[in-house]
Amino acid sequence: MVTVMDTTNHEINTQIKQIRERLSETIDRIRNVLQNDLSAFPLREGKRCFVASGDGASHLDDDKLRAMKQELKSVATIHADAIMAKLEDETLWLQLDLEIPNPVPKTLLLNVPLMTVLEEIARQTRAVLQAHGFPDDVLNFSYKTPTWFIDHEYMPGLIEQYWGLLTALKTANSDALQQQVDQDTDARKQRWDDT
């Protein structure tokens, strides 16, 4: 015999499964954008620092500048791939203990474990620039998720979707837990009455 609670359990479990699938798809899309952006970050930030440093980069002749750019390309290749491998860890993304504000953020800054992994590209970029004598005042940067379209994907929108789905998953998990508590309570009441 199928009870109302069995139906509700099935509905909640189906809802959780659907949310997890949509969340996984969204995370995959975010990772694809990050793959492209992390690869571009060292050269993009290197150029910004070079231009911003004024006379601070005057010690670099063309050969040294080419060498630095090659090092930044290496950082992009080596560290972007290493970061992407770490981003495969689902626990970085499923931070269910976070308090997610409403409206949901358009950045990943709230997810500190994830941002710690992403920040590695900035640390490595900074190390190259420091080794080439760039002044500290232009090296005060961190990795920020892109706010522009990359491969027809708009990262702020994807991030909003990520936080929204994470909130929905937290709510559905909480509902499932509450339903289990209610079922256990009802079962104890019924046992009491039947004994």
Image (spheres, grey):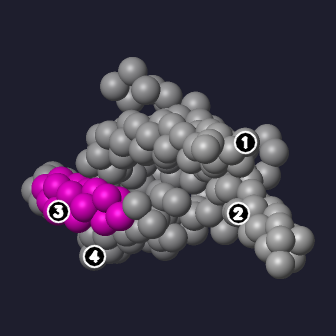
Is residue 18 shown above or below 73?
Answer: above
Say which of 7 and 174 sits in front. 7
Horizontal side of residue 36 vs 119, given as left or right:
left
Measuring from the top left, give residue 183's x and y in whole percent: 75, 62
Mark 1: give few (<14), some (14-19) or many (20+) Cα within 10 Å. few
Q: Earlier in the sequence, mark 3 or mark 1?
A: 1
Which label number is shown at residue 4? 1
Identify residue type, mark 2. Gln
| Residue under numbered circle 2 | 180
Identify residue type, mark 1. Val
Q: Earlier in the sequence, mark 1 or mark 4?
A: 1
Q: Earlier in the sequence, mark 3 or mark 4?
A: 3
Identify residue type, mark 4. Ala
Find the distance from the CA under tag 2 to the CA under tag 1. Answer: 13 Å
Q: Earlier in the sequence, mark 2 or mark 1?
A: 1
Which label number is shown at residue 131? 4
- Residues tagged 3 and 4 counted as in contact (Cβ below 8 A): no
- Residues tagged 2 and 1 counted as in contact (Cβ below 8 A): no
Most distant residue in the top direction: 152
Residue extent of the magenta highlight = 70-89
* Label 3: element kind: helix
Q: Magenta includes 81?
A: yes
- Residue for point 79% across, 52% down: 101
Find the distance from the CA under tag 3 to the CA under tag 4. Answer: 18 Å
Mark 2: give few (<14), some (14-19) or many (20+) Cα within 10 Å. some
Identify residue type, mark 3. Ile
